[in-house]
Image: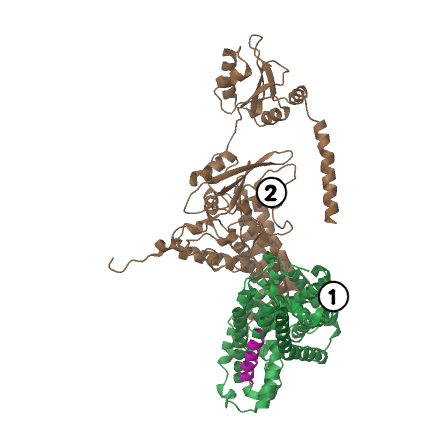
Amino acid sequence: MNLQPKENKLVSPYFAFYLINTMQVGVGVLGFQRYIAKSAGHDAWMAVITGGILIHLLVWMSYRMLKNSGGDLVAVHEDIAGKAIGGALSTLFTVYSGFLALTVLRTYIEVIQVWMFPHINIWGISLILLGVVYYFVSGGFRIVTALGFFSVILGTPLIFLKYFAVKDSHIYNILPLFDHSVTDFFVATKTMTLNYLGFEMLLLYYPFIKHPEKSEKWSQWGVFFTILVYTITAVESFAYYSQGQLKHTIWATLTLWKIVEFPFVERFEYIGISMWLFVVLPNVCIAVWCVTRGFKRVYSIKQKHTLIPVLILIFAGTLFFKDRQEIDLLNSLVSKAGYYIIYFYIPLLFVLHWLVLKVRRKKDA
Amino acid sequence: MFGKRRQKKQDRSQNQSPRQTKTRLTFEQLMEKCGASKDFVSFTKSDKHPFTISYYKSMVNPDLVHKDLIPYLTRYSSLSLKELSREIPVENIEHTSDVQTIMDSLLTGSVIVQSRPGKSDCLLIPAATTEKRQISVPETEFSVVGPKEAFTETLEVNINMVRKRLPIPELHVKEVTVGKLSKTRVVILYIDGIVNMENVNTLKQRISAIEYDHILDSSYILQMISDNQYSPFPQLINTERPDRVAAVLSEGKVAVLVDGSPSALTGPTTLVEFFSAFEDYFLSWHIASVFRMIRLFSVLFSVLSTPLYVAVLTFHYEMIPTDLLGTLIASRSGIPFPPIVEAIILELAIELLREAGARLPSKVGQTIGIVGGICIGTAAVQAGLTSNVLLIIVALAALASFTTPVYQMSNTIRLIRFPFLIFAQFWGLLGVAICSAFVLGHMLRLTSLGRPFLAPLFPLRMTDLKDALFRLPFNRQSLRPLQMRPEDPVRFNSQRGLQKNDIEE
């Protein structure tokens, strides 16, 4: 089993910034405002920051764990639980990655359905999008990373569109500060972490970063940038919408784009949604890549052999979840799984792995 | 699967080799074979002078034979071949009896001299004649300022033009012969000590692996040695400017010259290099940078403008501002076709004009351009077949595609517009984005001689950006591009280049 990929397949440490950031900014940012405002109201933007700080901590834990294991999550699992149980746990994680890809893709298709083409054939658009995914993933991790890089470069300028909303917003909407109870904050923070999901893919692509120890600061910067994007979006949305309006706005960010007006183009959300393809694609690609990589690590199946079946399963999945309720169910299921993985599983692994290594070191000595 | 195929290939080549030895000619057979052509001469001057002279009339310089060969043969008729070779005032005379060598040199313009007819022991005297074209002004890569020399079809002259610009012994020239029938001489140039030998070896290995019967231009080689032969993007630069070749050689690239071809190939190359004209280095850096930006913008415009028109008018007409809507409605109201049909008709018409202009002699070509562009365009709008807004867009897009300095690339750009059009018709703006994703993925996967094609954008190399999308002044160009992994990355001492004197010094 080749644990260490070939040198010419690795990416430079600073790409960790793009990999982490691109994976966290996805379809969530288009409409997370309503969910976090449900509990913490106009104070929810602070939950964005507290949630982000927790992510910083989790990234720190992941790096400690990965450095000590000298590999990826599969190696950590094997250290702790042995080959059989460890393999089973890794498989579960891999399946979760697959569901993450499915959720992102299906939600994006839903956005297309709601905002651009109400009568579009789901299978058609799903097929062509998965075709793009196949093209990128079959190019290898470097190509997927490159997509993440271009995604950040192309997606970030869209933040400046907030300028149009700033003109019409009232900063008093987010005042007074600290108007909600600690429990409300806690619930909002919990809801918010779901948008930060995706960084845990690091556990699988870690060996593909050149000098991975050096990439930690880039990863942390990536998380920081994510927090910045979400905070700006949240503050702006809360200043623009009243809380009553926000309750009925499913895609708050998209609605903000609607008011953008240039002399040569109106209804900017069409351009925005099209460009959002570049933000969504790396999410799907990285997750799908992680699925194939996971299977390769656990079962030694060639990645090119798992890629097509995985894509077919995701294709079937996009057809299976039909309407808003089902997609919402899918979203909340995957979020719940992600919530447990990042808040309970990663810290647990961190502690266990630390203990196991300590005991082993003692035995050796 | 691959192993089996390779084995089969090996078997075949093993079968081939004994057949080749069987068909090996004897000297008599060779003479007979050559004698079948009308332009082959073989004669003995007289009984007194026993030497027999044979050559292809069409390949040999007659002056040399008359002035420098026949007089000596008659004067020294009693000498042996070996002694004779010392007397004849021509260099590189070979004395051999190997039939294969004799045949090769006969066919490249040597005169063979035998001591007696029928004896295979003979002298090979190089006397090839080369008719060459005058060195002319570069046509596809014309520049207003700077040198006005372009490569010609003669390999020696081309190498001379490069070596004249880089008179250093480190400029190495390696020759490979390819093509079963054409026996084309292909030359690889590089500067030893700057170039990364990995690039040279890759290139050499790929060129010697070419199996084809005739290689008549460097563009054959360009396609055959590309990393991805199925890609519409050229992966090596084709240039007709010796100054450009000299410049890229000093960056650590490798150049390929082909006998009989007036253009050189250079590589490894990147996408942005296709949009830098060599004239950029003759203009001040601000102007050059702005021009490069304009070129890049024009490429984007050229590829995306018509697809966006189709996407917006077919699906997203809400996006058009009210003031603009009036103009569009006025121009499209009488048109019987949907936007996609209208766009495809016009795009094809422009391609038609370009192709007709390219195939016709230049004087007629100009007329066709004017007739087609002005008359047909105006007539089509007045007849109500196309809208004049689209006509403007299509004409501008065609114009924009011609700003690309490398001809192969500008063709590619016009070609990839069509898939974009089709995607725009299917999924509107989203389709354009999907098609862009495919193109981006394709370019990311491309390599040129094994080096990433999209560098310095990906992988991001900050130091290489100084001469990519824009061009910084020469004193900032102290390092050669990292892309080629040059052995000696330093062009000059940057400290000295950037030193600033105090106000009063």
- Total count of labels: 2
Closer to the camera: disc 2 or disc 1? 2
Label 1: how many Cα within 10 Å (few below 14, some 14–19, many 20+): few
Q: Quadrant of residue B164?
A: top left
Residue A57 highlighted magenta (yes or no): yes
A116 in relation to A49, above or below: above
Q: Are marks 2 and 1 on the same chain?
A: no
The reply to whether residue B222 is in sight is: yes
From the top left corner, tell me how far across and down residue B241 is, in percent. 48, 43
Q: Which residue is at a point 57% across and 9% down the rendered structure image?
A: B46
Eyeballing the image, is B13 above or below B119?
A: below
Name the one closer to the observer, A86 or B219. A86
**Residue at the spot of label 1:** A312
Magenta stretch, residue numbers: A44-59
Residue A115 pos. (x, y %): 64, 75
Between marks 2 and 1, how big is the CA–CA gap?
Answer: 41 Å
Side (left or right) of A320 relative to B399: right
Going by the numbered disc 2, the residue's amino acid type is Gln
Numbered disc 2: secondary structure: helix
Q: Position of residue A150 (x, y in %)?
A: 56, 64
Say what amino acid the circle numbered 1 marks.
Ile
Q: In front here: B252 or B372? A: B252
- The residue under the point 50% across, 71% down is A263
Secondary element under disc 1, as helix, strand or loop, is helix
Please report, as a chain letter, where disc 2 is located: B
Question: Is residue B337 visible in this depiction of the protein?
Answer: no
Query: In this structure image, what is the colour of chain B?
Result: brown
Question: Which residue lies under the disc numbered 2?
Answer: B205
Chain shown green: that is: A
Chain bearing mark 1: A
Seen in the image, is A106 located left or right of residue B185? right
